[in-house]
Image (cartoon, grey):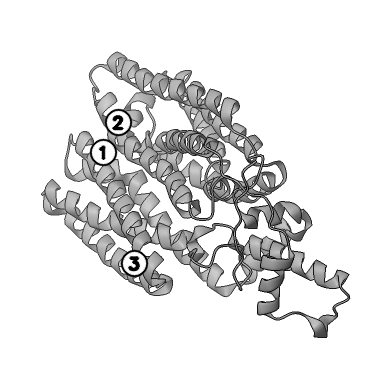
Amino acid sequence: MKQSVTMVDVDGTGCPASTKTSDLCSKSLAINGINGHVEAMEREEGKNEKGIRSPEEREAMLTGDVKPLQSRVYCTRFLILIVFSLYSMVNAFQWIQYSIISNIFSTFYQVSYEQIDWLSVVYMLVYVPLIFPAAWLLDKKGLRIVALLGSGLNCIGAWLKIASVRRDLFGVTMFAQTVCSIAQIFILGLPSRVASVWFGPREVSTACASAVLGNQLGVAFGFLLPPILVPNTPDDLDLMANNISILFYGTAAIATLLFILVVAVFKDRPPLPPSQSQAVLLDNPDEYSYKQSIVNLFKSVPFVLLLLSYGILTGSYYSVGTLLNQMIIAHFEGQELNAGRIGLTLVVSGMVGSILSGFWVDRTKTYKQTTLAVYIISFIAMLVFTFTLDLGHIEVVFVTAGVLGWPSGVLTCCATE
């Protein structure tokens, strides 16, 4: 079996000296694993605390005295990444498909805009209490179980929506959307794990970004397609019901196909780890404590500040997405299609910002400065977007939406790194 050898640098990361920090989503885990590996060897040799080796001695031990662990990358990794990105895309599509045509669903189900808004808000509401149990399950049971739960619940929710295409069954569609929102708990935490478990050290950042990109594409399609597939026909409710059925059936068919693919191709991990750092983690499974990692995070003041600031800004963007249809219709009557296109502009601008900022921070490492600049730009962009809505020129809204979307992508990149 082909064996790839990776030299370990002096800081104990398990990455080649030329590999950038962003090449490993779970670098801190690798550090703990390698340090524990070395310390165990030192204990066996009778070293006491005063005799701990210098970084140079550690490097010599790891690169010379210790035989490198086997590592290898498999072509299957690309199939797993594609399947994950696609079912993540479908889940994100289901999040926004109601809100972007909220006036149509409000008419069909004979409910208020506030009730339609809950079909979007439930995604955020469910995420808060369930993300920690989902992360624990991922840590204990592995990728396959969590992927099956995410894609399976996504599929079930999509089929339940088909059963809700009747004017008096808003409760059923609310339940179906809740099922989809639970599915996202088992989706949003997977990109970094898929990347680190299946991809080599030079591929991790790209794989992680590609997996996140699938979710963003789902939101983009969620803004674009529902206004096209379900035009506003208040005088013909039967036609409206038929159009909604087409939307739901198409989503359910794709979600079912992707669930079958997950069952067929998704595995917990490859036969051999893709990098030395992953090999060390497998060789020292007791070095990592999920509970302790959570405690350590919340003891970190920079992490807590990033959590709060990123949460506030992200919540603002989600609010714009949820209420976009209502804002546009209030100022530009009958412009459901353009509301979807404005949402698409918002997301695509963010995706471009994410890609460009990735190149920028990868070369400059100015994470803090870039994040602060993004907060300032976001504040100004939100003000401009808010106060230009009522000018009566929808072209201006397209431009301000693009400006507003760009910082969101940049911040997502910086916060994730």
User: Under tag 3, what secondary structure?
Assistant: helix
Asked if 294 appears above or below 171 in the picture, the reply is below
- Whichever of callouts 1 and 2 sits on the residue coming sooner in the sequence is 2
Q: Amino acid at mark 2?
A: Leu
User: Under tag 2, what secondary structure?
Assistant: helix
Of badges 1 and 3, nearer the viewer stands 3
Residue occupied by mark 2: 225
Q: Position of residue 275 (x, y in %)?
A: 60, 53
Q: Position of residue 173 (x, y in %)?
A: 47, 27
- The N terminus lies in which quarter of the figure? top right
Answer whether residue 320 is visible to the viewer in this image: yes
Q: Position of residue 130 (x, y in %)?
A: 62, 46
293 lies left or right of 348: right
Q: CA distance from mark 2 to mark 3?
A: 30 Å
Residue occupied by mark 3: 374
Q: How many marks?
A: 3
Q: CA distance from mark 1 to mark 3?
A: 25 Å
Q: Amino acid at mark 1?
A: Gly
Q: CA distance from mark 1 to mark 2?
A: 8 Å
Residue 167 position by quadrant: top left
The disc placed on residue 410 is none
Q: Amino acid at mark 3?
A: Val
Residue occupied by mark 1: 340
Answer whether residue 167 is visible to the viewer in this image: no
Q: Residue at x 61, y 62 (%)?
A: 14
User: Under tag 1, what secondary structure?
Assistant: helix
| Residue farthest along the bottom direction in this orientation | 50
Asked if 27 appears above or below 344 in the picture, the reply is below
- Whichever of callouts 2 and 3 sits on the residue coming sooner in the sequence is 2
- Are dots 1 and 2 in contact, CB under 8 Å? yes
